[in-house]
């Protein structure tokens, strides 16, 4: 068994405000989440990633903090948070939190002070320019909703830099006082008991912004410093970062050129995410095979975090325009389903036409590929989106617990809810909810529980190496394997609709193996691996070999 817990984790991400409301004010809270920990334990989740928990004017769903040392009073108190950590730990669940230190809210006291006077002690905590920078209209992260990256502030009589929305001024990481503060923030939460951080916007945090230079240099050493700091404070804490950059730049985020992973432990696999979407759209595994082949090798200890959906849009910016159009045609045919000229603001179940077979296929594929799987709340029951809500809020609707008012999320008046529940159509809480699926052994939720339990018995998926099995296969079929000290698993996934037969007889199983451990249905025994049946949209997880001691 690997001793890096994060390699064999199942991560579940959620917004506290839309998960469970314990006091009936219409906003989810920490006590509500505590009440749902047993549900998460049963599902098999081992690590929660909480979206921003800090006080915030919530103009970007909490990704605009006004105080890094507290929790949003709408969610509860620091005492409630400590209790959450304790109760989660009792159930073997770790908690990581979003660390959003590339920027603050423009209402953060630091920025309020900084803009008030050039003599403010916080002036140099942000990035300023006296003149209008030439790159003012370059580098926007939210095209369509954001028109500049430098905004003139009349009070400050200067231009401030903001990689994201203009209410999110960037902190100046070139300032040693800011660096020290970031470390202090991390120490604070580690001391309270979090197991690490989901680091927002890593490539921008390390940017040493120069006015007028849209390609300002990056200081990777800051990541090394943060890693050291975190590890001294808590040996098993992790940094899981968002760095959606060109593939050849990725290894540098994990470690320096010496080859050791001395920076970030884990990165979200955005490359694979885009390729998975393309493969599902085409019903052809080739893009995934390319991703497995072309991803740069990671330094020892580096780990990918895989995902199909997260809290943001599906970002297709690493695909070509033509490939992006193929994905749009299948999964985001209406203009209204797309966002920022690069993505899709939908959940997976509606994208796949609520076809149970395709949903299982997609999640079976994600969870069996290299890396640590990340699951977005509500996906385990096949929730839908609400396209009448603006932007990314479409996929941030309240969790659907049961068929009772407000989906069992809250007892508040419906108009007081933080966001409306989905109450119409095939994804309404009447049709899609936890309670109904818990009672049904054939439900998607029951499937997720079984699939995750199977994954937990196959640690080579997270800790071992994953490779494409390069043999001729029928169209639409992907064969891949995971090898580790715990043994070998082989996987077949049929992205197409036609029945298939696969010949893997060149593999060398142990005497009493191989056996099927998970599949979309019962298949004839594996036998000599020479005639493996696979239905359209079918999948099989086959154990080929066990390592010693298993
Ligand atoms: C990250 C978050 C996104 C947020 C942005 C600004 O990309 O995932 O939700 O809007 O950072 O903090």
Image: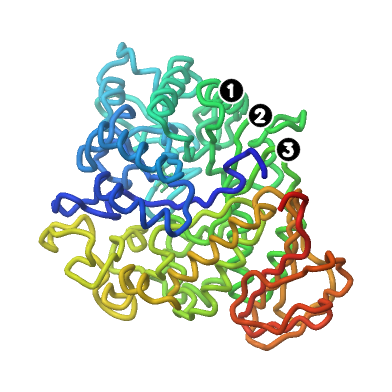
Q: Secondary structure at mark 3?
A: loop
Q: Residue at 31% across / 69% down in the picture?
A: 435
Residue 363: x and y in percent read 55, 67
Which residue reaches farthest left?
Answer: 413
- Measure how far apart labels 3 and 1 are at the Cα level: 16 Å
Q: Is residue 399 left or right of residue 50?
A: left
Query: What residue is disc 3 on?
Result: 300
Q: Is residue 294 left or right of residue 7?
A: right
Q: Residue 538 versus residue 508: which sits nearer the camera? A: 508
Q: Quadrant of the N terminus?
A: top right
Q: Are marks 1 and 2 in contact (CB under 8 Å)?
A: yes
Q: Secondary structure at mark 2?
A: loop
Q: Residue at 52% across / 58% down in the picture?
A: 315
Among the two numbered marks 1 and 2 on one chain, the one whose residue lies closer to the N terminus: 1
- Measure how far apart labels 3 and 2 are at the Cα level: 9 Å
Q: Residue 369 versus residue 417: which sits nearer the camera? A: 369
Q: Are marks 3 and 2 in contact (CB under 8 Å)?
A: no
Which residue reaches farthest right?
Answer: 506
Which residue reaches farthest bottom?
Answer: 498
Among the two numbered marks 3 and 2 on one chain, the one whose residue lies closer to the N terminus: 2
Q: Is residue 510 left or right of residue 356?
A: right
Query: What residue is disc 1 on?
Result: 228
Query: What residue is disc 2 on?
Result: 262
Q: Residue at 68% across / 33% down in the picture?
A: 261
Residue 467 visible? The answer is yes
Q: Is residue 304 above or below residue 308?
A: above
Q: Is residue 294 above or below residue 528?
A: above
Among the two numbered marks 3 and 1 on one chain, the one whose residue lies closer to the N terminus: 1
């Amino acid at each position: 068994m690997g001793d890096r817990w994060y390699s064999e984790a199942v991560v579940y991400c959620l917004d506290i405000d839309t998960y469970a409301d314990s006091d009936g004010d219409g906003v989810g809270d920490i006590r509500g989440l505590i009440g749902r920990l047993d549900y998460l334990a049963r599902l098999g989740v081992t690590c929660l990633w909480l979206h921003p928990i800090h006080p915030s004017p919530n103009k970007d769903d909490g990704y605009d903090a006004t105080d890094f040392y507290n929790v949003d009073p709408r969610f509860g108190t620091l005492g409630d948070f400590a209790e959450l950590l304790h109760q989660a730990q009792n159930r073997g669940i770790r908690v990581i939190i979003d660390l959003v230190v590339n920027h603050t809210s423009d209402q953060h006291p630091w920025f309020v002070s900084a803009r008030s006077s050039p003599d403010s002690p916080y002036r140099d905590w942000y990035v300023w320019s006296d003149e209008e920078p030439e790159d003012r209209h370059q580098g926007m992260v939210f095209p369509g909703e954001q028109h500049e990256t430098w905004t003139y502030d009349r009070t400050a009589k200067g231009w401030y830099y903001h990689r994201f929305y203009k209410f999110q001024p960037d902190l100046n990481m070139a300032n040693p006082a800011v660096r020290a503060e970031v470390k202090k923030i991390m120490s604070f939460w580690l001391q309270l008991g979090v197991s690490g951080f989901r680091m927002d916007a890593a490539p921008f945090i390390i940017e040493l912004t120069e006015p007028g230079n849209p390609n300002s240099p990056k200081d990777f050493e800051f990541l090394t410093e943060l890693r050291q700091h975190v590890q001294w404070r808590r040996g098993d804490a992790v940094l899981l970062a968002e760095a959606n950059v060109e593939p050849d730049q990725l290894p540098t985020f994990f470690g320096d050129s010496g080859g050791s992973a001395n920076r970030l432990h884990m990165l979200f696999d955005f490359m694979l995410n885009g390729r998975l979407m393309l493969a599902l759209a085409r019903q052809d595994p080739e893009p995934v095979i390319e991703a497995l082949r072309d991803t740069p090798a990671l330094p020892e200890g580096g780990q990918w975090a895989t995902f199909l959906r997260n809290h943001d849009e599906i970002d297709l910016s690493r695909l070509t325009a033509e490939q992006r159009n193929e994905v749009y045609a299948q999964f985001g045919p209406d203009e209204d389903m797309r966002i920022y000229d690069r993505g899709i603001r939908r959940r997976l179940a509606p994208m796949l036409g609520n076809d149970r077979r395709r949903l299982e296929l997609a999640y079976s594929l994600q969870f069996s590929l290299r890396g640590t799987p990340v699951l977005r709340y509500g996906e385990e029951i096949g929730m839908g989106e609400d396209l009448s809500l603006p932007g990314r809020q479409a996929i941030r609707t309240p969790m659907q617990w049961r068929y009772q008012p407000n989906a069992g999320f809250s007892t508040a008046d419906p108009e007081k809810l933080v966001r409306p529940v989905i109450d119409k159509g095939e994804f309404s809480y009447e049709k899609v909810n936890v309670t109904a699926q818990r009672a049904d052994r054939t439900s998607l939720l029951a499937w997720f529980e079984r699939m995750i339990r199977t994954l937990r018995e196959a640690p080579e998926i997270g800790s071992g190496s994953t490779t494409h099995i390069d043999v001729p296969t029928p169209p639409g079929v992907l064969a891949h394997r995971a090898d580790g000290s715990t043994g070998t698993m082989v996987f077949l996934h049929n992205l197409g609709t036609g029945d298939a037969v696969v010949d893997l007889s060149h593999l060398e199983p142990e005497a009493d193996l191989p056996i099927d451990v998970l599949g979309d249905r019962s298949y004839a025994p594996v036998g000599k691996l020479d005639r493996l049946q696979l239905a359209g949209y079918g999948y099989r997880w086959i154990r080929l070999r066990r390592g010693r001691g298993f």
